[in-house]
Amino acid sequence: MLLTASYFCYLCGFAVTITWGAGFLAAERGFSLSWAAGMTSIIAFASLPMATVWGRLSDKWGRKRLMVGLLFVEALAISGIATFQSPMALVALLVIYGAIGPLAMGPVSVAWCLDFVTASRLAPATAVGVFNAIGMSSSFFAPVASGWLWDVTGSLEPAFFAAAAIVMLSSVLALLPRETVAQPAIARQPSTP
């Protein structure tokens, strides 16, 4: 349940960033909407190679340390998006966010969930289904809550800072579950010629 709560929290940050990213950059940073949309698409582009990298590293090092560290940096990147105004800084932050965000780190979360499922002999498809359903419910909550903050404050900056705080909470929640596999399975397999 702690891992599921962490998943929900870090997907809240993703929902805010994806839902409002282009609008924020256009409305509050003065970029054209087409340029702002292009900038936010960097998130998906940067995630493509990194999903494999993080998956491989989590198989070698374990899931917990990797996730906690990535979530911490993710929270900093989201708050940086709300703070910096330089186009180069924003592009760098969006690349960083894409490289470590949910699109790149999702396989690690699912693998950790499956580690728990395997250790407890639960039905894997049901367990991952519940994990994913609770996590994806953030896509209903986060845009509405952040839109409300925008209405109340007149700016999306507080919404991004709130999203960063929620992702930081996700990092703390990821500290609490145990690492379920003492030695990652890939490290125990004998090499074959």
Image (cartoon, rainbow, N blue to C red):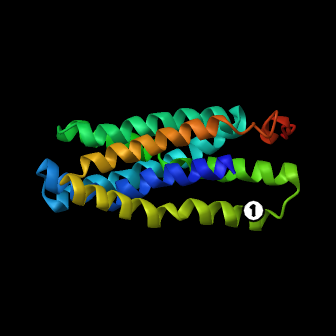
* Residue labelled with disc 1: 127
From the viewer's perspective, tell me whether residue 39 is left or right of residue 77: left
Question: Where does residue 77 sit, x and y in percent of width and height?
Answer: 37, 38
Disc 1 residue crowd, few under 14, some 14–19, many 20+, Cα 10 Å? some
Residue 81 sits in quarter = top left
Along the viewing direction, whichever of 180 and 191 lies nearer the viewer: 180
Residue at left offset 84%, top offset 37%: 191
Locate residue 40, reporting x and y percent.
30, 54
At label 1, the amino acid type is Ala
Residue at screen point 39% across, 35% down? 76
Circle 1: element type: helix
Q: Residue at x 69, y 51 (%)?
A: 1
The single residue placed furthest to the front in the displayed view is 152
**Residue 41 horizontal/vertical position (percent):** 33, 57
Quarter of the figure that contains the C terminus: top right
Residue 45, relative to residue 99: is it above or below? below
In this picture, residue 57 sits left or right of residue 69: right
Q: Nearer the viewer, residue 10 or 41?
A: 10
The residue nearer to you, when weighing 107 against 24, is: 24
User: Is 22 placed above or below 88 here?
Assistant: below
The number of discs equals 1
Residue 90: x %, y % from top left: 25, 41
Question: Residue at 87% of width from left, 37% of height from top?
Answer: 190
Q: Observer-nearest residue: 137 or 29?
A: 137
Left or right placement of residue 36 versus residue 60 in this view: left
